[in-house]
Amino acid sequence: MRRWWKRLFYAGGIALFIGSASLTTYCAWNVYMYSGVGEEKTLAKAKDTYHFVLVPEELDNDYWRLVEKGAKAAARELDVDLEYIGPRQANIDEHLRILKKAAAAKVDGIITQGLTEVEFVPVINEIVDKNIPVLTIDTDAPTSRRVGYIGTDNYYAGFIAGRALVEDTQGMVNVAIITGSLTAVHQQQRVRGFRDAVKNEKRIRIVAVEESHITRVQAAEKTYTILKKHPEVNAFYGTSALDAIGIARVVEQFHREQETYIIGFDTLPETIEYLQKGTIEATVVQEPYEMGYRAVKMMADIVAGHDVPAITNTETKVIRKEDLPLRPARNYEVKTP
């Protein structure tokens, strides 16, 4: 009798152990399955949100802040993540490093410039080889495998600047050009367009071309040096957003506002102030907000598998004091998004 009781006790213990183990296994499996489903949902949600990167030439430049403003407006509409990151001051090496870092992070698309053919084309091609589409903005890299370009026709912009100078001046004109960069493609195109626009005008002579490195200070320093070396200069052409501002400061210091014609680029607040005063006679207007806005929209089309045009030029025109105020304001009012 005692043996039977012991056997029954052992059998019950074993059954209880098996039942407990089964229940534990069942609960663990359900927890695992629940967490797995949650993880899949999280990953699916992450994949539904594209991650684009906009890399400007100069992060805190007011012109690029307008590009950022437009790009972020489009990103909000499309519910995509947009990262705006670039060099604090124009620096090609730093720019390229940031592009490579974005590619290494396996973002869904990169929007940037093609500032120089030698440095930028290989990097753009390397990124595209990793199945990451690249759109160029503001400055094209047509020999690269970028998917498309959106922005100003920089040669045309330089050409209409030259024609504006021809129309606005009389008599002998000795012109000095201050350019943001001697090596950046878009700056070269703006100089070339200007030269072609005035080359058949015998009364117009280009006497100097100097580089500002896209800073007000160096634009002013180069203007000072030019006026000391070439006092006959009575006209200036600035090819980047900050050049005409630096030129205007020095021209006012020399009290030569009445006898010096200045044409620049873009509509930064200081540029508009000098335009209203009459120190700057004219400026070439681009559409930075539209560039950023349309670039993000186009990148979304690209990653969705749609065809996009190889080149999309935004509007470019010359404005003078009588054209103020400018509309639509979103292309000209600098406010950080």
Image (cartoon, rainbow, N blue to C red):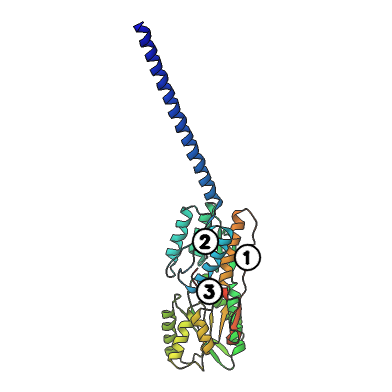
Q: Is residue 243 visible?
A: yes
- Work out whether 102 lies above or below 16: below
Q: Which residue is mark 1?
A: 311
Instruction: Specify the amino acid type for callout 2.
Output: Val
Give the structural element (helix, strand or loop) at label 1: strand
Q: Classify 10 Å Cα crowding around label 2: few (below 14), some (14-19), many (20 and above).
A: some
Circle 1 Cα neighbour tier, 10 Å, few/some/many (<14 / 14–19 / ≥20): some
- For label 2, the residue is 121
Is tag 1's residue or tag 3's residue first in the polypeptide sequence? 3
What whole-number distance in Å separates the C-alpha atoms at marks 1 and 2?
17 Å
**Quarter occupied by the N terminus:** top left
Residue 312 position within the rendered picture, expressed as x and y whole percent measured from the top left: 63, 66
Residue 250 falls in image quadrant = bottom left
Tell me the distance, in whole angstroms, between the alpha carbons under discs 2 and 3: 17 Å
Question: Where is 214 relative to 275, above or below?
Answer: above
State the residue at coordinates (50%, 54%): 107
Q: Nearer the viewer, residue 211 or 280?
A: 280
Residue 261 in view: no
What number is the disc on residue 188? 3
Q: Going 43% across and 29% down the picture, which residue do you hit?
A: 24
Q: In the image, is residue 322 above or below residue 333?
A: below
Q: CA distance from mark 1 to mark 3?
A: 19 Å
Instruction: Identify the mark nearer the N-term, 2 or 3.
Output: 2
